Image: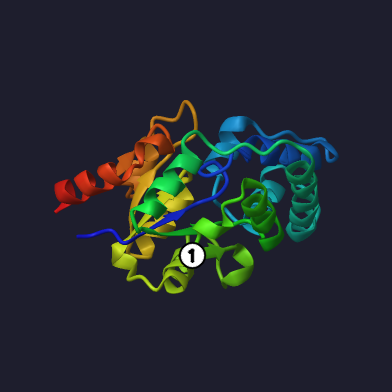
Amino acid sequence: MDIEAVVFDMDGVLVDSEPMHYASTNEVLSARGAFLEQSAYDACRGMSESAFFGLLVKKFSLDEDPERLAHERIRASLNRLASQTLLPMEGALDCLLALSIEGYRLGLASAARKLQVDLVVDKLGVRRLLGAVVSLDDVARGKPAPDLFLEAARQLDCDPARCLVVEDAVHGVEAAVRAGMAVVALPPKDDDGASHQEAGALQCLGSLAELTPEFLEAWVVASD
């Protein structure tokens, strides 16, 4: 099977923003006397803000509307993304350039809101390389539903079966599989990727420096 398009998650895949989101999460929780451990946060990567805070409200027995807490974290994250240095993940920019030059169609599909996605894409300067930029505001359901990736495939005018997804979150891997796409995982640091492969990731990468045109060609041959 030939791969014609590669669809990237954003946070933790293209941009090293997860520490900012984790800090914003605990900024919101600390005002309620709660604290979320890093491992618990990592297990929820890829979820929409509303679903995430729905879990946290139950976990910490908070008597508040999850939507209100979600909007509070979005504001805190936007402030951090706008005011702090935003670094691409290792190999991300070289990966995008190399794949684009080789003619692969490239897209981004993120469970973040449009304001966050646009801010990151523009700060990284990669919009011209992306034929699809999809946020949670563009679809009915977030991950692990397949909507984000199917919308990216639609915008790229590509059969989902010819798309490869790159994800750091287990929920994102599940969404890609449900969309009928092949998926490779970029697990968080100190995560062996076992849960990602159990969810359907065909391979785990150490960084996007590994995702070269040569890798894709060899991977396609091996998967046939």
Image side of residue 71 versus residue 175, left or right? right
Residue ID at (68%, 41%):
21
Image side of residue 19 versus residue 167, left or right? right
- x, y percentage for residue 67? 75, 60
Which residue corresponds to mark 1?
131
Quarter of the view holding residue 114: bottom right
Query: Which amino acid does the dot numbered 1 rest on?
Result: Gly
Q: Relative to the observer, which residue lies in front, 159 or 141?
A: 159
- x, y percentage for residue 158? 36, 70
Image side of residue 170 versus residue 34, left or right? left
- x, y percentage for residue 111? 58, 57
Callout 1: SS = loop
Quarter of the image with the N terminus in it: bottom left
Q: In this figure, what is the number of numbered marks?
A: 1
- x, y percentage for residue 97? 44, 48
> In the picture shown, does residue 8 fall above or below 133?
above
Residue ID at (47%, 43%):
168
Residue occupying the far top of the picture: 190
Image side of residue 15 versus residue 66, left or right? left
Please tell me how crowded label 1 is: few (under 14), some (14-19), or many (20+) other residues with Cα within 10 Å: some
